[in-house]
Amino acid sequence: MQLRVQLLSLATVALLGGVGVAQAQFIAGVNSEQRPVDAPVITQFVKDSDWYTRALTGVEAPYPSSLQFLEDQGAWFNPFTRPGMPGPYDIRGWHASE
């Protein structure tokens, strides 16, 4: 039993020994009411033809006016521009090439 405790203590020291060496990483949202001063900021979001091709996957021209929101789309997450569920739910064919 005592040997087990010693081994666990030794393992803990070995694991914690590298903690002081690790560099601090940025974690957003710790204080959700304020944006940290050193938080990364996107200053420019360019939507090139590749972006539009990907965003309009499975949609045929003429594009419906309901997709006008893509003009205002920034760098934030939008599930419309990413593959969803496969199988019968994949109405835009995102998973057809996989």
Image (spheres, grey):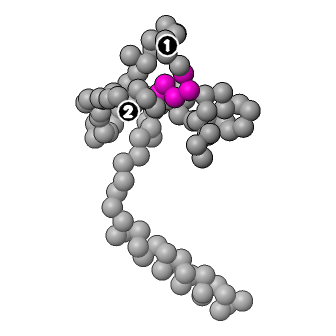
Q: Quadrant of residue 58?
A: top right
Residue beneath the point at 32% across and 39% down: 39
- Determine whether 2 is above or below 68 in the image: below
Q: Residue furthest front?
A: 61
Magenta-colored stretch includes residue 56: yes
Tell me, yes or no, if residue 34 can be seen here: no
Residue beneath the point at 49% across and 16% down: 61
Q: Residue furthest right?
A: 88
Magenta-colored stretch includes residue 96: no
Q: Position of residue 82 (x, y in %)?
A: 53, 34
Task: Describe residue 87's horizontal placement relative to residue 72 as left or right.
Answer: right
Q: Position of residue 37 (x, y in %)?
A: 28, 36
Q: Residue furthest left?
A: 43
- Assign a secondary structure to mark 1: loop
Q: Position of residue 81 (x, y in %)?
A: 50, 29
Residue beneath the point at 72% across and 37% down: 87
Kindly identify which numbered label has been placed on residue 28: none
Tell me, yes or no, if residue 66 can be seen here: yes
Magenta segment, prevailing SS (helix, strand or loop):
loop
Q: Indicate the quadrant containing the N terminus: top left, top right, bottom left or bottom right.
A: bottom right
Residue beneath the point at 29% across and 34% down: 41
Q: Position of residue 28 (x, y in %)?
A: 41, 41
Q: Contact, CB < 8 Å: mark 1 with mark 2?
A: no
> Which label's residue is closer to the chain start, 1 or 2?
2
- Assign a secondary structure to mark 2: helix
Tell me the amino acid under the disc marked 1: Tyr
Q: Which residue is mark 2?
A: 50
* Residue range corresponding to the magenta coloring: 55-59
